[in-house]
Image (cartoon, rainbow, N blue to C red):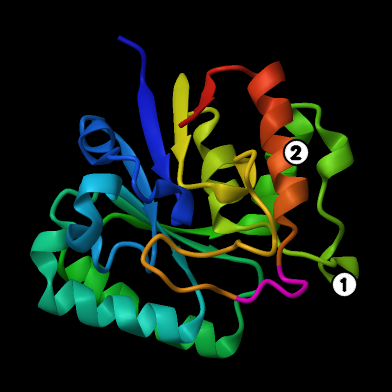
Amino acid sequence: MKNKVCIVGSGNSLNGRNLGNKIDSFDNIIRFGGADVDLHDFAIDTGVKFTKLYHNCNVPAMRRLKKRLVHDQNKYKSVREIVFAHTVFRKKQRNCFRTLRRNLQKLEFSYRLGDILSECNEKIKKYECDEFIFPPREKRLANPTSGLYAILDSLERYDEIYLCGFDALCNSYSLEKSPRHYYGTGFELRHKHNLRREADLVRKLMKTRGGIYLW
């Protein structure tokens, strides 16, 4: 039996596809902070289960997670690890994470900090996709997304990786209609991410590494 994982993005390409049961049938399911909040409202399309959570390190997001861990522990009972992904870890973030970490330890959650930029570049070089390397922080035009980080982080951990809810990988993707979350809200990209470039990297990995499948 091959080691498999389903990585569930928050794109609106999940809507209306009835993938919920198919997603929840996996033993390993990765989701992202923010998309874990109202899963039961969209369960038929998204499923509700997750075993690993990749979470943003901005201060408001960490504060919201702290409250959810305390007041809605049952939602996280299947979670085996929370990965806090960051590009720059400033003083306010460190202080907030220090408080959050006490809650994580008290509730016996496994967690780790991940440097998106260095870890993504390490994997990109390993898989000989050097044309997609992100430049140094001071010259960077766009940050890697936590979705790309989760995909690259999973390459050595799983034999088969199944992706859904990654709108930029869909043929119908357009900046006019995307990015939007399956739960209805859009978000402003500006220069923060380059989803088309990341999608091209994932497509190359699908061909060269193999074992990566898109739903």
Quote the CA–CA distance across marks 2 and 1. 24 Å
Q: Earlier in the sequence, mark 2 or mark 1?
A: 1
Numbered disc 1: secondary structure = helix
Name the residue type under label 1: Glu
Is the N terminus in the top left, top right, bottom left or bottom right quadrant?
A: top left
Residues in magenta, as a range: 188-192
From the top left corner, tell me how far across and down residue 8 is, in percent.
40, 46
- Predominant secondary structure, magenta span: loop
Residue at horizontal 68%, vertical 27%? 205
From the top left corner, tell me how far across and down residue 34 is, in percent.
37, 69
- The tag on residue 46 is none
> Is residue 152 among the parts visible in the rendering?
yes
189 or 2, which is in the foreground? 189
State the image quarter where residue 179 is shown: bottom right
From the top left corner, tell me how far across and down residue 159 is, in percent.
46, 19
Q: Which residue in the structure is indicated by mark 2?
A: 200
